[in-house]
Amino acid sequence: MPRAADWPRATEAARAGVVARAVDGDTLVLETGIQVRLVGLQAPKLPLGRAGFAKWPLADEAKAALESLTLGKALTLSYGGQRIDRHGRLLAHLADGSGRWIQGAMLEAGMARVYSFADNRARIAEMLERERAARAARRGIWAHPFYAVRTPEEAARHIGSFQIVEGRVLSAAVVRRRGYLNFGPDWKTDFTVSVTPRDARRFRAAGVDIAAMGGRSVRVRGWLRRYNGPMIEATHPEQIEFLP
């Protein structure tokens, strides 16, 4: 029987539809032709016609897992933030007729990882909990090195990709209202997390003091880019998990 917590009560039920097919491990097409992106998830990617795009490991398995959960089923869609993305897809949480939360099931199976946005943060804490359990059990993607949690020293080798990086914040500072978490002694070459003044408001609202994070062990996720050294720009507090 599904747990009561499986259905995202915090979001507003708004639409329903029958699933015609899966595009990949995090996108569905309803019988109406509407595309639905499972908000809060990133499943292994398929090329989908993109020239030069290499299929990610376990992409076929993730698509098959989503199909087994949803194909031909009537699902309820609910929303916890921005409802439509730039591609015209609905950004929704999904539940089947028994109340099973599809995002939760994909995370528990290790067929996706949490991928949140500042304008879509509903249920992220619960999603992270399910991701942690799957990773600890080495289910699905968590048994493959492509999806390994990186150290700060490894970050430079993964510029241009979405990564999860775990380490100890050596120092934290706010300079001209921008927050910085430094993971090494040289901010010009070492891994850093940056928070803009605008985004810092979300951290303050969540009770997170960026300047007080020095010495804390954290797990941070986001797109790695090069700004001096490797950097992740954190736009919302759910990108950073505090570790014991």
Image: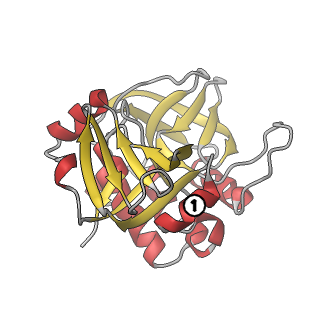
Furthest residue to the bottom?
A: 137
Q: Nearer the viewer, residue 133 or 165?
A: 165
In the rendered image, which residue does mark 1 sit on? 111
Asked if residue 25 can be seen in this view, the reply is: yes
96 to 198, vertically: above or below: below
- Number of marks in the rendered image: 1
Q: Nearer the viewer, residue 219 or 19?
A: 219
Which amino acid, by three-letter code, is at mark 1? Met
Residue 185 vs residue 157: left or right?
left
Q: Residue at x 53, y 31 (%)?
A: 17
Residue 216: give x, y in percent of width and height.
24, 65
Residue 93 image point, x, y percent: 43, 39
Q: Quadrant of residue 88?
A: top right
Query: Which quarter of the figure is the N terminus placed in?
Result: bottom left
Residue 1 visible (yes or no):
no
Give the percent coordinates (x, y) of residue 76: 44, 36
Residue located 40% across and 71% down the image? 133
Q: Quadrant of the C terminus?
A: bottom left
- Above or below, 131 relative to 139: above
Residue drawn at (23%, 60%) of the image: 214
Helix, strand, or loop for circle 1?
A: loop
Nearer the observer, 242 or 72: 242
Expressed as whole percent of the image width and height from the top left, the position of residue 212 reads: 16, 54
* Left/right of residue 165 with respect to residue 71 in the rendered view: left
Question: Which residue occupies the foreground of this view, 184 or 105?
Answer: 184
Q: What residue do we see at 47% from left, 64% from top?
A: 152
